[in-house]
Image (spheres, coloured by chain):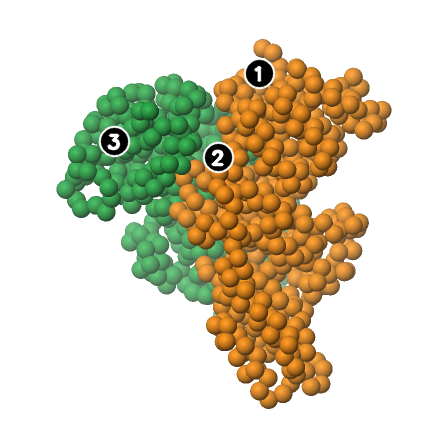
Chain colours: A green, B orange
């Protein structure tokens, strides 16, 4: 029985994990696939580097063409990262009728739709489970769910760094800067944490999830993004008093065929299953019309979880090869994208204001809300810290984003409103 | 294009849901499968009953043979329940080369291995996702996970009734009997709740999960079962003081190729993701060697979630038919069953004792533990309620079940130990 040959682009921690899993699970993979699988060639930067892995020097190359143009290689696994050059490599691989497995969220968020189209045109598989929350089989879960249901809402905690930071801030009453520093020391945050803490990483994953879940070509620019760097420990404490937990939540929601996708720090009602997802863990909550609420929980990153997802995808490619049905599942988005306008996006909001401690101020503020038809679910009067100033927290009932933004403008114009201290979306009111 | 014909055994709420989903998602199913799908014949008890569904009277029959012997019918969907007669029907269906989808956990827990073997021998698919936690794609998740990982532990909250009862007891400090009554009124518990509250329903599901997860032929008799009817609100309160949440947990664990499967009321450390699974929801926590901790959460029952799972299975059967690869996934267990002995099952334990309030009692008790090499993680001295008596709660470090059971025997023999009030397994200490 002839072995199926794999080409590997990249041999960092994930690539090394992939090689180890293929080796350790050779029997099991063969049982499922019907023939042996071997890694034939690996693209690396430095062929002379010492590696703790059973790869001979002859298998290493610094020239991608050695893999992309090798007619023996059936499947290309991409774990090198990067966007533009990597896209060119994978395009070439697909043109040469090689199936592709990638763990690259940046690439899939930016060029995913195009690459899926190329895969489909070339009769090739393109699988990318590892690109979103490595250890959680969420993409397959969505595909399965879609078979007999309609997904109307996705909410995800899809960035481990920010979840680690918000968990520590919440449980230990510590400041953002303190916890960020600890996260950097522990290796949970990078020395330049911008992509994580400003929500860009989460936005890329939500792009991939929304594109698949709604079968629309959602692009990164469609995602409204706000990071966690301005979240204060005071906000978290006041939210907690009202029964909310602060999380960085990606939301993708569909109503009447129009969708919204956003990432922002959000107060979740404490009883929501996502509120209990702590530390560096990830979870994706899915609301299907028939099935109702489901949630997938697991490690969002880490080289072994990611490598496991890559090998699961590889096994699916190999099964499809055996069956001769590759290229059927790489479905390009089916529906035309329709994004909601601000007056079609509805949510509850948490708003914290510093106001002058005068008679009639409260009436003045609430009248602005009622002029826009927005009412309150909760009101909290906070202890006064500065003489002459009062702080209040308002939680609205559902309001359109358009109305809410107009209210904010009008509140800022009020002479009696000193500062809008913070404003967050609130999720999870309906059980 | 000729339609694929389905025979349906049973037309209760799940069966009706299946008919509706097939009708409403006809386009989507056709897109995936390549041909139309129609329900041809339905087995019912009464053909004259009024039904809110587009099924003509000619499609109904009271004779199962009309379905099992109809050469036009390719797939039999079983949603009628029952065990022995149903097994005979499905055996006949498989012998007649019909693929089977079932939602029947009782049947699969008792005759699953045999039926899977028959399916495999006849080149037929036998899918049963809906039999465990209807709304959660856990069986497919396990199969996927198994492709490139090794599952060492499963923990499940797999019974909605008991989870509803324990959640209300915990959150509202109410008694078991009070909450059971409410659950019965709300329709979450049956008028004879034995199968749920004594853990039998959960044991059936754990049998199915363990058989698949470990690929061993686990039978219902292998599962140690204890129900929740003796759990008191006091136990829950004392556990809560120590940082634990009470859940009915099914555990399936493998160490050194030997396994244990059990269902019992368990104290979970509050930070464990299963501790946040409330009300009638279900969840299955999976520990894979490479991937680490993952969890699948969703509705455990309900006619629409269950019907959705049935139709997902049906779509997989139909895809396999198109590819001509039926009967490959109905794998009979691969490994010989090896069960752990009591000295190989390790856990922490919560023990609540009523003792005489005398000097030296505590030393007497703890010396029994130390003679068996068992030490303590937590000790709680409870307020004395009766004169001359004290209550203490002990939480052990990991101990073998054999040692722990010996300790219990010796404690009961002590003159100073008035009563062993309660004893529970504790899970989730290691993060």
For label 2, the residue is: A140
Image point 61% across, 32% down: which residue? B115
Tell me whether the residue at label 2 lies in contact with that at label 1, contact meaning CB atoms closer than 8 angstroms. Answer: no
Frontmost residue, B2 versus A141: B2
Image point 18% across, 46% down: which residue? A50
Choose the circle earlier in sequence order: 3 or 2. Answer: 3
Callout 3 crowding tier (Cα within 10 Å): few <14, some 14–19, many ≥20: some
Q: In this view of the protein, can residue B148 be seen by the observer?
A: yes
> Callout 2: residue from which chain?
A
Marks 3 and 2 on same chain: yes
Image point 60% across, 71% down: which residue? B408
Image position of A31 with respect to A294: above or below: above
Q: Position of residue B197 (x, y in %)?
A: 71, 54
For label 3, the residue is: A40
Image position of B394 with respect to A282: above or below: below
Callout 1 crowding tier (Cα within 10 Å): few <14, some 14–19, many ≥20: some
Q: Count of labels shown? A: 3
Image position of A241 with respect to B335: above or below: below
Per the model, the C-alpha gap separating discs 2 and 1 is 23 Å
Which element is circle 3 on? strand
Image point 64% across, 85% down: which residue? B357
Is the N terminus of chain B in the top left, top right, bottom left or bottom right quadrant? top right
Give the number of the mark in front: 1 or 3.
3
Q: Any mark on residue B35, and which?
A: 1
């Amino acid at each position: 029985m002839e072995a199926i040959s794999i080409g590997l682009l990249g041999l960092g921690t994930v690539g090394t994990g992939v090689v180890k899993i293929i080796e350790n699970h050779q029997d099991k993979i063969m049982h499922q696939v019907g023939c042996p699988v071997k890694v034939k060639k690996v693209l690396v930067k430095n062929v002379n580097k010492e590696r703790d892995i059973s790869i001979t020097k002859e298998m290493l190359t610094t020239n991608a063409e050695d893999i992309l143009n090798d007619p023996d290689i059936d499947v290309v696994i991409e774990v090198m990262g990067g966007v533009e050059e990597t896209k060119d490599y994978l395009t070439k691989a697909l043109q040469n009728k090689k199936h592709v497995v990638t763990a690259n969220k940046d690439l899939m968020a930016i060029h995913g739709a195009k690459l899926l189209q190329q895969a489909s045109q070339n009769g090739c598989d393109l699988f990318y489970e590892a690109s979103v929350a490595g250890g959680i089989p969420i993409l397959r879960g969505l595909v399965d769910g879609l078979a007999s249901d309609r997904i109307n809402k996705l909410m995800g905690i899809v960035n481990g760094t920010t979840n680690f930071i918000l968990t520590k801030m919440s449980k230990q009453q510590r400041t953002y800067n303190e916890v960020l520093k600890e996260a950097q020391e522990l290796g949970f945050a990078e020395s330049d944490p911008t992509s994580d803490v400003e929500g860009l990483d989460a936005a890329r994953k939500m792009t991939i999830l929304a594109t698949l879940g709604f079968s629309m070509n959602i692009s990164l620019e469609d995602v409204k993004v706000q990071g966690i760097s301005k979240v204060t420990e005071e906000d978290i404490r006041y939210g907690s008093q009202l029964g909310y937990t602060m999380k960085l939540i990606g939301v993708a929601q569909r109503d009447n065929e129009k969708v919204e996708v956003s990432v922002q720090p959000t107060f979740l009602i404490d009883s929501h299953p996502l509120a209990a997802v702590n530390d560096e863990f990830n979870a994706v909550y899915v609301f299907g019309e028939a099935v109702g609420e489901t949630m997938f929980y697991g490690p969002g990153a880490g080289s072994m979880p990611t490598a496991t997802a890559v090998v699961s995808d590889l096994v699916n490619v190999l099964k499809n090869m055996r069956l001769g049905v590759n290229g059927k599942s790489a479905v390009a988005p089916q529906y035309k994208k329709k994004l909601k306008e601000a007056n079609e996006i509805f949510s509850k909001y948490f708003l914290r204001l510093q106001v002058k401690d005068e008679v009639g101020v409260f009436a003045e503020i609430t009248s602005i809300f009622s002029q826009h038809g927005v009412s309150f679910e909760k009101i909290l009067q906070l202890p006064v810290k500065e003489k002459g100033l009062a702080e209040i927290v308002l939680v609205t009932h559902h309001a359109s984003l358009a109305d809410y933004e107009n209210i904010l403008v009008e509140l800022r114009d009020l002479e009696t409103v000193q500062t809008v201290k913070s404003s967050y979306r609130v999720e999870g009111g309906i059980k």
